[in-house]
Image (spheres, coloured by chain):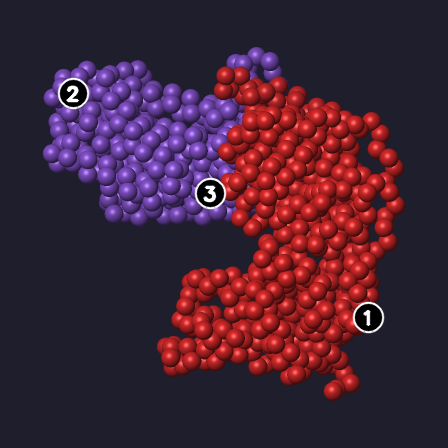
Amino acid sequence: MSPIPLFRGENLGKSYITPVLSEVGLELREGEVLALAGENGAGKSTLTKIIAGLVRPTEGEMHLRGARFHPASRQDAERHGVRMVLQELGLIPTLSVAENLMLDHMPNLGGFIRRERMNELASRQMAVIGLEHIDPRTPVGQLGLGHQQMVEIARNLVGDCQLLILDEPTAMLTSREIDHLFSQIAGLKRRGVGIIYISHRLDELQQVADRVMVLRDGRHIGTRPIAEAAQNDIVRMMVGHDVGEAPALTGRVPGAVVLETRGLTRGKAVQGVSLQLRSGEILGLAGLVGAGRTELLRLIYGADRRDSGTIHLDGSAAPARIASPMSAVRQGIGLVTEDRKTQGLLLPLSIRINATLANIRAVSRRGWLRPAEERAQVGRLHALVGVRSHSVEQPAGELSGGNQQKVVFTRWLHRDCRVLLLDEPTRGVDIGARSDIYAQMERLAKAGKGMLMVSSDLRELMDICDRIAVMSAGRLVKVFERGEWTQQALLEAAFSGYLGAAAATGAPPPG
Amino acid sequence: MEDVSTTAPGRTAGLARSLRGTLGNYVALVAALAMMVALFGSLSQYFFTASTFLTIANDIPAIAVTAVGMTFVLIIAGIDLSVGSVMALSAAVAGIAMLHWHWPLYLAVVLAMGVGMLAGLLNGSISVAWRLPSFIVTLGMLEVARGAAYIATNSRTQYIGSRVEWLSNPIGFGLSPAFFVAMAIVVAAQLVLTRSVFGRHMIGIGTNEEAMRLAGVDPRPVKIIVFAVCGLLAGLAGILQCSRLEAADPNAGIGAELVVIAAVVIGGTSLMGGRGSVIATFFGVLIISVLEAGLAQIGASEPTKRIITGCVIIIAVILDMYRERRRRRA
């Protein structure tokens, strides 16, 4: 085995406005499987995308077999034998399996495809990965997601591959397919291919990895040989020391139940979720990406149709009829969407128009707008929430992320609602705006509103929530009371749905 | 199109100020119009006459009225290709009412608008219920309405005569009732667009329909109503055109939808939705009409006129793309 490592990354870093990755070093030897673990947003995706040429690092250097490596693009990286299987499959659903496998090197004669040869080559490639029972002429879109994933992996297992990155490869595979994949990986190791393997399924890592590397907040926390790393050690490294408990919340005594769900279900994404939200309470909703939190909010809001289960408002025995967001808003529920730019705001239009969207009746009379009244009402809320802008006429698209989010908040203050659903309300928001938003939420809680808040930031949830519900693989695993929780316990609950053989039948794990 | 509002308490003062502000926005259009008038004025000695301007003024009502409806449809990010056929169909039905059932003019006008509204309702309901692109649905209606117009008139032009011509005869300052009706509709539509809740919802839906839905505003009835209004106005345009021809011609309005769309785009309404102004559309209509009248006066042949008009439309759409790109980048 060569003394020069196959791949070496030093001091790798990437910043957009704030750093998402800093001072990360990584070493991969030939024939080794390095597992990469970390919470949502820890930087795993960014790091591997840098290696695969999809993202340019803002600092740091990489070496491939001792030679400097700085891929200009994904194709450039692939030419050097560095390949990445993304979670969002790169297959073209209307083309056949063979066409997808041979996409950039189809056997042809002067530009005309030699179909038989193509299908034959494809069959051979598929047999290697255990897919020999699939007809290479099948359109990829007709295959189940598990098989599609296998085809995507097969596409990348070509001869010149030196370094292969797999991002959550077993997300949608059955255990039989996972076994096939692992034997493929063993074969690659024998050929000296280096593999970086990202997964939340800690028990799998024990099976397939040689070493495990943990990232947290964009930094490299530690790397251990897998034999020396127990699952709790890995989780502890991902989480770090527990943050001290926030000072006791004053003046917040949750009242009666304002919202209750019983057995809400939608396919695999949300399975039988029952919870209660009380007035004056901030209930956090934690879990890994893909655990079903956004889907749950959308079900409550009527944005998606539920398969079964009921929603009850204000403790009523009769289920509420929430067939659409319009009806949810009418019954006093608001939603701060996960993606404010595409789902929350009308970017080219003014703050004023965005703020009054949910309650136009308050600023109009018999169908005609009352501009002076509208400006007064929005102006007041604007100042209250602390939006920084020239005026309420400024287009929402010109504001910073934090201020845009505040405009969305203003909308739900303008339309007074008793239940407010929030999906990652402080994502991409600077520290200053964040504390303003927390202050608003405090105010709303004191005024007796109930808030259900999805967040991937455990520290944030622990700071401001009264209770935290944890979802994992579509199910509601546990609800923690204030004082009962630790970061470790929350994370363990978030992972719990993905551990063990039972995981294969649950919802796909996060990315 | 931003809501140009005022701080003045009086409504008339507010209206005047907002009109001034609105005109200010349309400097480019006014300039283009003025340039064209000056150009044709210098090329032809008959251009700068009252008779030319009156002819233009009395020629535009049908197109102007249809363009108002089309503006609304484009603002909600839709399109209505059937307006030309609906014009012909409405005129045909109104013609039958007057000739065979002896209906008075005003009832025939109502009937024409009703037929148009029905077509528009179908367009809107079908595209909303099945989530089909309005391009396809109205393309189908284009054929259906045209066929129906032929059936109604037995494929022959129905000569109606003096009873219908009243609408196009000058009654004041040399201008026809059709002209005044068109102006009233332009003003009313602009007010609805900029000052009403409905107008606000239209702009929101054209900008981001999903965000509107998630804010609790149902886009579906708005979209259906907009198509119905466009159809209704196309029906009105049909009978206005009928009065100009003094006949119901089943071939009327062929290709009208493209001229109307061109006028709307020249005026600055975006093909992508979310932005537009009826007043600006009116300027677009004027520009196209002046262009056509001017080209005719300097003796340009029909094919030449079409080529030049076509070029103007393409340039306007390219400019619209740049404008849109700058706006969406915000």
**Discs 1 and 3 carry the same chain letter:** no
- Residue B5 occupies quadrant: top right
Q: Which mark is residue A491?
A: none
Helix, strand or loop at label 1? It is: helix
Disc 2/disc 1 C-alpha distance (Å): 95 Å
Q: Residue at x 35, y 29 (%)?
A: B228
Amino acid type for the residue under numbered disc 1? Glu
Give me the disc on residue B98.
2
Colour representing chain B: purple
Q: Is residue A154 left or right of residue A162?
A: left
Comparing A224 with A431, the one in front is A224
The answer to which of A471 and A70 lies nearer the viewer is: A471
User: Contact, CB < 8 Å: mark 2 with mark 3?
Assistant: no
- Does A476 appear above or below B180? below
Residue A228 - label: 1
Kindly state the secondary structure of the residue where label 2 is placed.
helix
Q: Quadrant of residue A66?
A: bottom right
Name, please, the residue furthest toward the top. B10
Specify the colour of chain A. Answer: red
Label 2: how many Cα within 10 Å (few below 14, some 14–19, many 20+): some
Residue wearing tag 3: B272
Q: Is residue B232 visible?
A: yes
**Dot 2: chain letter:** B
